[in-house]
Image (cartoon, rainbow, N blue to C red):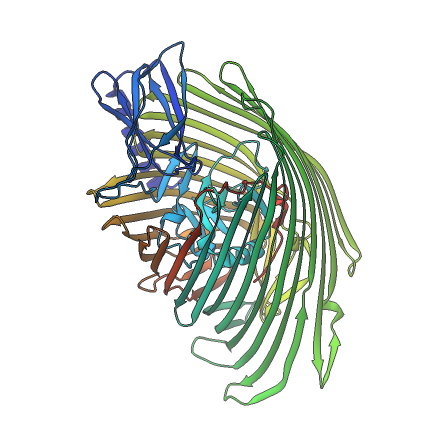
Amino acid sequence: MMPNFTKYLLIIISFLLIHDNIQAQVEAKQSSIKGKVLDEDKALLPYIVVNLHLAKDSTLVESAQTDESGIFLFSKIPFGTYYTEIELIGHEKNISRAFTLDTGHLDINLGEVFLKTIIKQLNTVDIKAKKPPIESRDGKLIINVSASPLAAGSTAMEILSRVPGVALDNEGNVSLRGKPSVSILIDGKLTHLSPVQLANLLRTTSGNTIQTIEIISNPSAKYDATGTGGIVNIILKKNTSFGTNGTLTFGGGIGKYYKSDAGITLNHRSGAFNIFGNYNYANNKQYENLFLTRSTKATNDITLFDQIAKGVSSRKNNSYKAGIDYFINDNNTIGFMTNGYVNNYDGTNKLNTIIGSQPGKIDSTVIGQNSFIGQYKSQSYNLNYKSVLDTAGQELNVDLDFSQVHNTENAYYNNDFYDAVGLSFRLPFIFRNATPSKIKILTGKLDYVLPLANKMKVETGIKSSDVNTDNDFRSEQRVGETWVNNESQSNRFFYKENVNAAYVNLHKDFNSTSLQIGLRTELTHTEGKSITLQEKVVRNYIDFFPSLSINQTLSKNKVIGISYSRRIDRPDYQSLNPFVYYVDLYTLSQGNPAIKPQYANSFEINYSHKKMNISFGYIRTKDVITTTLLTDTVKKTILLYEQNLAYRRTFSATISSPITLTGWWTTNNNVTLYNSCFASPELMGMPFKSEKTTLELSTIHTFKFSSTVNAELSANYTSSQVYGTYIAKPIYGLDLGVDKSFASERANIKLGINDLFDQRQIKIKSAIPAQDYQLKQKQESRIFRLTFTYHFGSNSIKASRDRSNSSTSEQSRVKSGG
């Protein structure tokens, strides 16, 4: 570990030990209180503040906030006599009867608490609670995206890049506190996409549809074992009221080019049926500039490359979802849902490559005029059955899913060659690539929850998934006026994968301790076959993935916890395909059918005191899958190649804390320090090791100017860090947003400015001493966005159910575009 990291770590540990020694004795007896808040029409009241008071002197003990379902919870409450108090503008104050927590009444359920509307209302100040930008609970870091004016009009990728502890590289790969290979879930469902496809999906997911983002460092056995770096779960918005209603959204933006987006959400409940759906459209045109300098060295020969690429791309994205739920009775529901997208992409790229034998000398120039067209389509179907078997919480969920993805990509390359004085010295090299791919995913899962006596609960389930992919890569070269197939660059590749999984989780709550222990097992069968090369790779293996979480309440405001999990990452489907793909004339990409899965053991210690949270983490990954940049000194090319390095290990320490500066100014702050090391006994003919300590800083400031006007300022900084075989230089930026509600809060207008000073750009260099390259990538990042949202209809419809489709994991490894 680096000396600076060790020093900071020892300072933090010493602080915690001193802090603990001067605290009061741990409360021996504690309990909990819960309930659900509704209005007099039985409509849910989410995000309402509930105050808990001591009955003897009305002292305020603690405040809680209701969730999306109107449920509030006070946990780890010492024995005593209490009452609750709820105030909401336009409603009568609700004060509960006094109740006592003791050994005979460990958990109090107040049931449904109703707030009665005041018929005649005086002019008052709106005190409706607003969720904080960031929360930490239940082992998760929760970012409340819907509360942020910066989310409006942004894409999921842009929002994710501003989440504390999360980083994205130039290809859209996500890392968490220095740990790559993060699984992206949407509504608890694994997306089963490759990094490239996932990046495209995040670019096409509107921030207007996102409710929260959950960061889970050490998931339980209930989750798919995929994701050695942890889990990012994107929760989409859901309707929470009764009646027939919907939401309209319109927005526009301007950077160098104009952007636009629009969407509609509808929900209707009639009798035993609930019908829901949404549609979103986005048109995003943007630029990207890339600068690459590199050199290749042979025995007595050196070649210098200086490349400048300027590209413009346009994405037109259409996404939709529709479904129906049938409530058989109060305890049984069956539903059907379909969702998908149709995205179109086109782009042009002008690439100048200057080639010389020494600095400042031009021997030749290659000018490339390239164009790209793609269409990306996906359609998924879900059949779900949910049964609540008894009032104790026994529950059964069954999901069947079928998904199909069809991507079509066509690239056209026109390369002209000029000598040192600018004269053409050879015929243009013109070629084109077609890369259609088809993917089918069939999955099914069953989850069962069984509450037991003495605060114990068992969760168990099974899952099976089948994936079939067909990649038909075709390359053609133009000779005269005729296109000729280039058989050496064409390849047909099939991939099949079957994973059968089973898990069991045991939860147990003691007086001041909670325990969760779980085990997941997965049996995997894979077949990768290159029709062109007549090569076939078959693998069969079984894995066991234990997980453990222990939380100890030290006092009313102090909790310490420890967690462990073992996880896996299988290579994405296209990375196994051995075909060679031209990014440009001197930059190639190739898959590797010999890539092995990578396995990680992850440990974390968390300590929370009031609202401050401190965590220490360690993760070691074996056979880490890494994109390496390899230089061919003969062909003068650079190859992006997937392979396994021996290991990656990361130490991390994080401190996060909200601070209230005034009644109208609050902040959320996050500091993360981590040390990452990648190593392999052999890479390019010699041992490889790359290590670096990185500092991440993030602060979000929320300003409440009035009951209807809010503003948000967000700033983040990440120092230099290592990604496998390359090093990324520091990246930072500032974002600003403001929103105003009107028309009785049915309407809202948001103005957001991303990357106010246009500072965000990616810079990388080689971490391999034998290689020399530096790359700078600048995408359009300073964008002004204006978004209008209007909620119409009744406020009394039951929300469509949240479902965790069984195919999410498999879809996350599909490469999609758009």
Please say if 77 is above or below 712: above
Q: Nearer the viewer, residue 739 or 638?
A: 739
Residue drawn at x 39%, y 37% as measured from the top left? 45
Q: Nearer the viewer, residue 159 or 582?
A: 159
Image-quadrant location for residue 101: top left
Furthest-front residue in view?
119
* Quarter the C terminus occupies: bottom right
Please say if 521 is above or below 5: above
Residue drawn at x 33%, y 54% as measured from the top left? 743
* Quarter the N terminus occupies: top left
Please say if 259 is above or below 647: below
Q: Is residue 6 visible?
A: yes
x, y percentage for residue 173?
A: 51, 53
Q: Nearer the viewer, residue 218 or 578?
A: 218
Image-quadrant location for residue 4: top left
Image-quadrant location for residue 778: bottom left
x, y percentage for residue 286?
A: 46, 69
x, y percentage for residue 78?
A: 32, 17
Q: Nearer the viewer, residue 432 or 688?
A: 432
Total of numbered circles in the picture? 0
Q: Is residue 503 visible?
A: no
Left or right placement of residue 400 versus residue 259 in this view: right
x, y percentage for residue 144?
A: 39, 45
